Amino acid sequence: MSSKSSDDDKIKVFGDKLESQALQKGCEEDIEKHCRRCIGYPTMRTMNKLKKYGMYTLFFMFIFVVVFQFSEDVRQPAYPVFKRSETNQTNRMIIVVTPTYKRMTRIADMLRMANTLSHVKDLHWIVIEDGNKTIPAVQDILDRTGLPYTYQAHKTALGYPRRGWYQRTMALKLIRSNTSQILGQDHQEGVVYFGDDDNSYDIRLFTDYIRNVKTLGIWAVGLVGGTVVEAPKVVDGKVTAFNVKWNPKRRFAVDMAGFAVNLNVVLNSDAVFGTSCKRGGGAPETCLLEDMGLEREDIEPFGYEKTKDREIFVWHTKTSTPNIVQSKKNQTKPVPPPDTFGYFVEV
């Protein structure tokens, strides 16, 4: 009786084992089918089939990556992209000084300059009006830039030439008496640049050149001094002379648009634009820089590194006054200003 029971137990255990193996195999097959149906992910069973195709897969992936990278390089623009400066590693505030005066083309000039400066971070724009009061239209342009700015009116004083000398002098005095307000809380250093409102500026002049001036920075200027370009002559990183036509023997033969001075140099001197300059052929740039105690050895040249195809970042352009046709009737009477049809034009 006991022997028969023992045999039955063995048969039962063996049957359970077979049933367990069958269930396990069935579950594996069901799981694999389920995985394929839901996510297409191969199990260990199907991974073996993929091994022999692995090298082919890696090869085609490599070809895909190479082709994709090449297509990305082709799509990159060959021209420089004008964009807002993203970083300011030097933490220097750029202080742009612009004298301005009433004329028919002034609003157009100011708009062009404002559109450039509005793309430059960490910039304070000082605009000095040659007149008894500021102009609302100019104020509106400054407001729309989103830049911190100072707009004041200082009519040219007696004895000064009407070429912005007095306005730049008033700007220098403003900088020295209100340094902390102009720099703001986030800046300890600055660079001063005299930018006229009728020039054409590349954004990189400010982001790549001016912001990096440690003492006195100088660069090329286009369409100035009766030449296509004026530029410093650089040998071994030092300025040895100037490629200019007018009075090349000046210590600083540079246009107003072709240099910038570190704020510390301005604050450590009381130099201004006087009523005249007796040195350097009467050029105000020479007198100002010499009065600041600067020497030619202090010059930091910018933009000279290439041997050809060098770029000019500032052009001394002039907006010509348009020839407005007026009626010839009643020539004995004063000619009235042209009709602007309700639009603001400084006529």
Image (cartoon, rainbow, N blue to C red):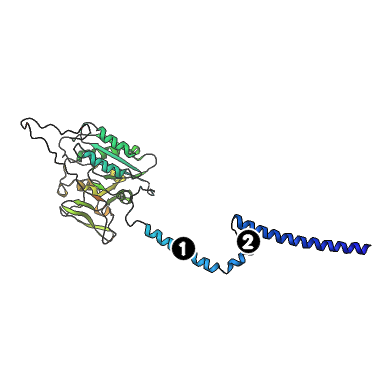
Q: Amino acid at mark 2?
A: Thr
> Closer to the camera, 278 or 145?
145
- Tell me if mark 1 has few (under 14), some (14-19) or many (20+) residues whose alpha carbon lies within 10 angstroms of its own: few
> Closer to the camera, 131 or 297?
131
Give x and y (percent) for residue 244: 18, 55
Mark 1 or mark 2, which is nearer the start of the sequence? 2
146 displayed left or right of 325: right
Give x and y (percent) for residue 133: 23, 31
Q: Quadrant of the N terminus?
A: bottom right
* SS for dot 2: loop
CB contact under 8 Å: marks 2 and 1: no
Q: Amino acid at mark 1?
A: Phe
Mark 1 highlights which residue?
64
65 displayed left or right of 38: left
Give x and y (percent) for residue 28: 68, 60
Label 2, label 1: how many angstroms apart (C-alpha)? 26 Å
Report the residue that reaches farthest toward the left.
332
186 displayed left or right of 34: left
Report the residue that reaches farthest toward the right.
1
Mark 2 highlights which residue?
43
**In the image, is residue 125 above or below residue 23?**
above
Q: Which mark is residue 132?
A: none
Give x and y (percent) for residue 302: 28, 54
Q: Quadrant of the C terminus?
A: top left
Q: Specify whether residue 35 is in view.
A: yes
